[in-house]
Image (cartoon, rainbow, N blue to C red):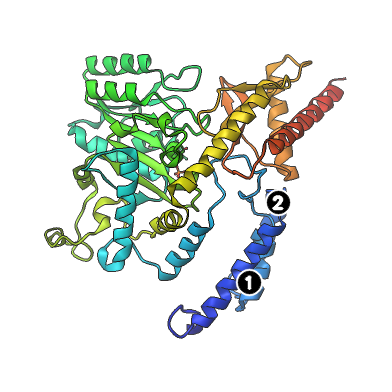
Amino acid sequence: MRSHLLNDTTTEHYRRSVTEGVERVAAKLATTDRPFTGVTVDDLAPRIDAIDLDQPLGDTTAVLDELEDVYLRDAVYFHHPRYLAHLNCPVVIPAVLGEAVLSAVNSSLDTWDQSAGGTLIERKLIGWTAARIGLGPAADGVFTSGGTQSNLQALLLAREETKADQLTKLRVFASEVSHFSVQKSAKLLGLGPDAVVVVPVDHDKRMQTVALARELERCTEAGLIPMAVVATAGTTDFGSIDPLPEIADLCEQYGAWMHVDAAYGCGLLASRKYRHRIDGIERADSVTVDYHKSFFQPVSSSAVLVRDAATLRHATYHAEYLNPRRMVTERIPNQVDKSLQTTRRFDALKLWMTLRVMGADGIGELFDEVCDLAAEGWKLLAADPRFDVVVEPSLSTLVFRYIPAAVTDPAEIDQANLYARKALFASGDAVVAGTKVSGRHYLKFTLLNPETTTADITAVLDLIAGHAEQYLGESLDRAC
Ligand SMILES: *Cc1c(COP(=O)(O)O)cnc(C)c1O
């Protein structure tokens, strides 16, 4: 069994195994003609159930053959131009190379003595990101597992900075289309059930700052404490960007921590063309960025940035076995002092490899392409009488629904759109997402693949219309 340990004596086995795996994936990518096979849970579950984990196959080739059957054949492939559903990006090759390196070396970024150069590389990327945001000379941050964790950490710091005696007095303001991790964080942070004040959005799904001002005033008058405002720079559903400068002014006025959730919109930090759309982000106290959404990085790759490095002390605990206090005076850089995690992947390496091979402009240009594609898609949808489209895109998301001329019952239209999404998924021809707008079912394209064309968009819209018409035709038959 020792032959499976990666070390000086097994490098040939390592090279062969990994190469064999890479070959399989490459062959798969070269031949997938659809984003999904349409496999069902009932098809797949018995295949996985039948495998006896106590009976190993021993041999890499046999295991890869088995993996083909239980995973690779039927996986959902984000690199395919007709995968248009969630905030998943195709990944860039330098980052995949980084992933292979970081797993093999297996550094853990919690302490210097488990990471060395990795620690400094991560720090440099945090500095780079903070500079792109414009957070100023005292900025810092740390890589996290994702936007959810970044938002949690940011709100933890905000909570600690209020120095409130009663958690139930704290209020967090976020728009009605902010990410649900704001609510989850409030719960985890022990805030009361009414802690999150939901602020309405305007026609373009941006936070109404007049309403925010009113809520902040109401909160203060009631003797409550405005702990934080979460501005979203790229909402999950619409890609809408809250008015950051106005929100920054209000945060200043009411003494609230300004957190910008740029999990999605962070891609604009690398864009020369559209960077201005997130102007005002530099006034934040903390920012969430998900490189695994708009920097074309493999999951996980995310960070939380703060304007004032000192605020990260709220996440600092010392342990004799890991990061004793004396190491601070010895100036040993232990990233665990800034993180909610302990053992932590060297995810930063993926971004490092990407920037060193492609440069920031390379990433920004890819993101610009999908933003431009969304603008084109919006024009197509707006001109197509079969569809109702909401919100002209600020990033790369399109939300729309099929509206047949002959049907007026909105519930029936809801059903037709739900059916179309399911039928499309079952066919595997394309994958799209869905959401609700004003209580009605809508469909969503999240465009993150520069390989997707307007022809793909047109073709998928035709498929959706076809499925919806089929549903309505059948329901007409049922009614007769
Ligand atoms: C995706 C998303 C998150 C959560 O990020 P994860 O990486 O999925 O944990 C938070 N906020 C917004 C706006 C998002 O789109």
Residue 272 circle label:
none
Looking at the image, the residue that sits furthest to the bottom is 9
Neighbourhood count class around disc 2 (C-alpha, 10 Å): few under 14, some 14–19, many 20 upward: few
Which residue is disc 1 drawn over?
A: 63
Residue at horizontal 49%, vertical 51%? 297
Amino acid bearing label 1: Val
Callout in the foreground (1, 2)? 1
Q: Please tell me whether residue 284 is drawn above or below residue 222 in the rendered image.
A: below
Of residues 249 and 7, the one nearer the viewer is 249
Q: Residues within 10 Å of mark 1 (few under 14, many from 20)?
A: few
Query: In which quadrant of this rendering is ligand 1 seen?
Result: top left
Place of residue 75 in the rendered image (x, y in percent of width and height, measured from the top left): 64, 54
Which of the pair 412/369 is nearer the observer? Answer: 369
Q: In this view, does 182 lie to the left or right of 116?
A: right
Q: Is residue 238 something that shows in the picture?
A: yes
Query: Ligand 1 within 8 A of label 1's CB?
Result: no
Residue nearest the observer in this picture, 71 or 169: 71
Q: What residue type is labelled 2?
A: Asp
Q: What residue did someone put label 2 on?
A: 42
| Residue 226 position within the rendered picture, expressed as x and y whole percent measured from the top left | 26, 25
